[in-house]
Image (cartoon, grey):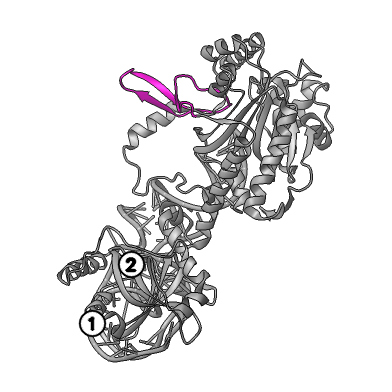
Amino acid sequence: MRPELIQTRIDKIALLRELGVEPYPYRFDRTHTAAEVLEGFEGREASGETVAVAGRILALRPMGKAAFAHIQDSGQKIQLYFKKDDVGEDAYKVFKLLDLGDIIGVRGTCIRTRTGEPSIAVQSFDLLSKSIRPLPVVKEKEGQVFDAWQDTGERYRRRYLDLVLNPETRRVFQARADVIRTLRESLDSRGFLEVETPVLQAIYGGAMARPFMTHHNALDMPFFLRIALELPLKKLLVGGFDRVYELSRVFRNEGMDRSHNPEFTMLEFYWAYADYNEAMDLVETMFRESLAKARGSLQFEWNGHALDFEAPFARKRMVDLIQEQTGLDVLNDPEDALRAKLKERGVKIPEFAERGHLIEELFDEFVEETLIQPTFVTDHPRAISPLAKVHRKDKEQLVERYELFICGMEFANAFSELNDPIDQRQRFEDQAALREKGDDEAQVLDEDFLQSVEYGMPPAAGVGIGVDRLVMIAADGYSLRDVLLFPHMRPEEGRAGDDEEGEAAEEGE
RNA sequence: GCCCCGUUAGCUCAAUUGGCAGAGCAACUGACUCUUAAUCAGUAGGUUCGGGGUUCGAUUCCCUGACGGGGCACCA
């Protein structure tokens, strides 16, 4: 940034103060938003009433002793007409010191210009905030945008500019708020209680993932940022909150791409006396409710696919889906056959892999990407589901669990929750054994959680929904970053403290 | 972590085979009392992402680093 571009505007601040104008006043009485003025424009034009609106100047077309401007207020642009004879000579001098990007408030009457554009003929105005850093200039004519500000990285880093300059970005985050509100309403209306549980945890659990670590100074001990909401919420089931949910941020120390951000918003709810079948019905309803609200229809295109949320979501067993794609009977064929199939595809099989892991790999490799329409994949292997209850029909190998897939991406994960404390302890011990063998995502035994289950946890269904991903569908985003206000980016000016960071990263591996 | 592409004025973009780094908008000065990508005249504005190399000469070619995008791997 050349300093003179900023200095010019700072100099104008001094000039304004000399003219008795405070460039950063405390408040402004506005009577209407820009949208409201335009809404009832005919009536206001006829009545000659005075309106007061405020917004950021995005276009200036001065013509000597008169000028047109557009200001933008809450995403709505409206044209202003300034005339020296109307505002007075002194005020017009002040007007001449305004720049693109300044925020002003105006009072005036509603008029249509010669070309018919509804506008405000300004009688008086206040400068509300002087901008000293030049805004990127985006021009527009008849809906066609010129010099659009579209650099993806810049839009993420300086989202505030993206919001000023790109109206569709504003709509994305309105849709996001709509989805989140709808999810809350879905659960609130069914008697679920919203709660908050700790982000900082001495032991992390509830999912297969690597955590972020931090340090508590006073206790001089490490803490983990939670990777899931699961365990504290189940303790609340033990405590007698039969329907609870938390809608909040979790953190996973893994790669970033268009469907992964290190922190993301998760909705988890726990529903006593229900099983995973009922939870499937509810999730299906919640997806319909939130998508209908945001998209206005349940059939639409996303990610290059025509999706149908109107029809009942498919419900298919994981083992059947694998059989359809590979011909393997993964529960009964010899493990070597499963390994061979994976090797064919060049999949690296970890040392510790049991049959359950092989089934998961086969699903990831052969099935996942084929699931375009909303599909509940049910009944996962035990080895990869240490918190889910054994399947009522196949206690040995399977658990009652489902994941919801759309366009090959996971959106929800749910179980009939494991409430048998003896089995739960055994599962944790199995996980510990896997960890010994090198599975660094195996879950850690949480004695405190186990004790709570030992007091008696009601049978329950539990569900986790990836809210950001749902918002991607709702707001027609292509990347998670499109629906996060401030997605994580590397620092712009190189990396500070290279050495330290390098070591910490290696420790985490 | 790997592969591919990109980074030039405040913004959007040019620059032929390696030969003086340009335009529009924004800024500044002036004209203009219904314009709308306002118009007209003029002025100023550059570490061509950083570092190194090849060359008489590098925005351009080579090496290296940073950042961004896309893909792969990992994961939700």
| Mark identifier at residue A89 | 1
| Vertical comparison of A20 with A414: above or below | below
Start-end of magenta stretch: A196-225
Q: What element carries label 1?
A: helix
Task: Determine if residue A489 is in view.
Answer: yes
Secondary element at tag 2? strand
**Residue A142 vertical position relative to residue A499 in the rendered view, above or below:** below
**In the figure, residue A504 lies in which quadrant?**
top left
Query: Is residue A71 on the magenta stretch?
Result: no
Residue A295 against residue A115 in the figure, above or below: above
Q: Looking at this view, is A393 or A215 the one in front?
A: A393
Q: Which residue is under mark 2?
A: A104
Q: What residue type is labelled 1?
A: Glu
Q: In this picture, is A460 found above or below B48?
A: above
Amino acid type at circle 2 is Ile
* Chain letter of the residue carrying label 2: A
